[in-house]
Image (tube, helix red, strand yellow):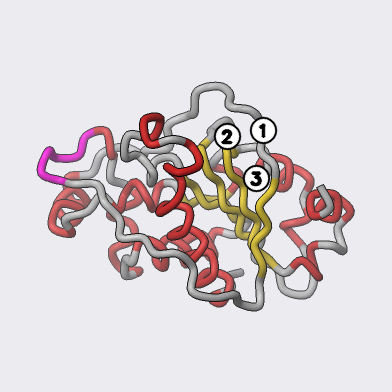
Amino acid sequence: FSNELEANLVKQVYDFVIAHLADHVGAEDLSGREEEETCVLTPYNRHKDLLRMKIADIPEENLEDYQTFSADTRRPSVSVSLSASPPQGRGASSSLPLSTPPRGSSRASMSPPFSRTSASHVSAAGVDKATIVQNIDTVDKFQGAERAAVVVSACVDKKPLRASDPHFINVACSRAKHMLFVVGNFTALNQCEDWKAVYTH
């Protein structure tokens, strides 16, 4: 399941976070690692792939190359940058900033094994989009990890379905050290008592 309208809105929220995270966390603490310290979580694999393509601006046929590239072994010529701009408007979905847990333990690495094929794609692109791609994932793949900023894309239509799973809600809403945003249809999400509690928090 995926929702292109929501994915477009998440892209706007993501760009806003990248542009302003240092103001909230502190530039010295980030040291230019905004993309490493920002993640997007969703309950659906198909929506995850759509988010990766939208946010990192990668065609679907090249997506696997960035998924298998290890940022720890990238070539020195690869630079890390992302042109970010604040959101330009509101869509049908809505984003909700929530209070976040205190700064805590070290975060887990999500980088998969190094791929020489993917290295050529990333180097040719002139930007380390692999870092962005590997920080957009499903909750099941993100357990035990933390980031300075987390954007949750609930991806619901008329019913919360998988997004109403208490495990998803608990993990998704407890990964942020500083900033948490939830993007979704809150009319549908509020059918779930757990999401209703998050919304009114």
Q: Which mark is residue 120?
A: none
Mark 3 Cα shell of 10 Å, populated few (<14), some (14-19), many (≥20): many
Query: Marks 1/2: CA distance?
Result: 6 Å
Query: Circle 2 — which element?
Result: strand
Which is nearer the N-term, disc 3 or disc 2?
3
Q: Say which amino acid is labelled 1.
A: Pro
Point out which mark residue 172 bears: 3
Name the secondary structure under disc 1.
Answer: loop
Residue 94: percent from left, percent from top: 67, 67
Total marks shown come to: 3
**Numbered disc in front, either 3 or 2:** 2
Magenta stretch: dominant SS?
loop
| C-beta proximity under 8 Å, tags 3 and 2 | no
Callout 2 amino acid: Lys
User: Foreground residue, 72 or 84?
Assistant: 84
Alpha carbon distance from label 3 to label 1 = 12 Å
Label drawn at residue 177: 2
Q: How crowded is mark 1: few (under 14 residues within 10 Å), some or many (20 or more)?
A: some
Quarter of the picture holding the N terminus: bottom right
Reading the image, the residue beneath label 1 is 101
Q: Where is residue 108 in the image (x, y as percent from the top left)?
A: 48, 29
Residue found at x 52% / y 52%: 40
Which tag, 1 or 2, sits closer to the chain's start? 1
- Tell which circle, 3 or 1, labels the residue nearer the N-terminal end: 1
Query: Where 167 sits versus 17, above or below?
Result: above
**Where is residue 90 drawn, in percent x and y?**
59, 75
Q: Which amino acid does label 3 sit on?
A: Ala
The magenta span reads 73-78
Q: Are marks 1 and 2 in contact (CB under 8 Å)?
A: yes
Give the CA separation, mark 3 to mark 2.
12 Å
Residue 17 forms part of the magenta stretch:
no
**Does 54 sit left or right of 90 as displayed?**
left
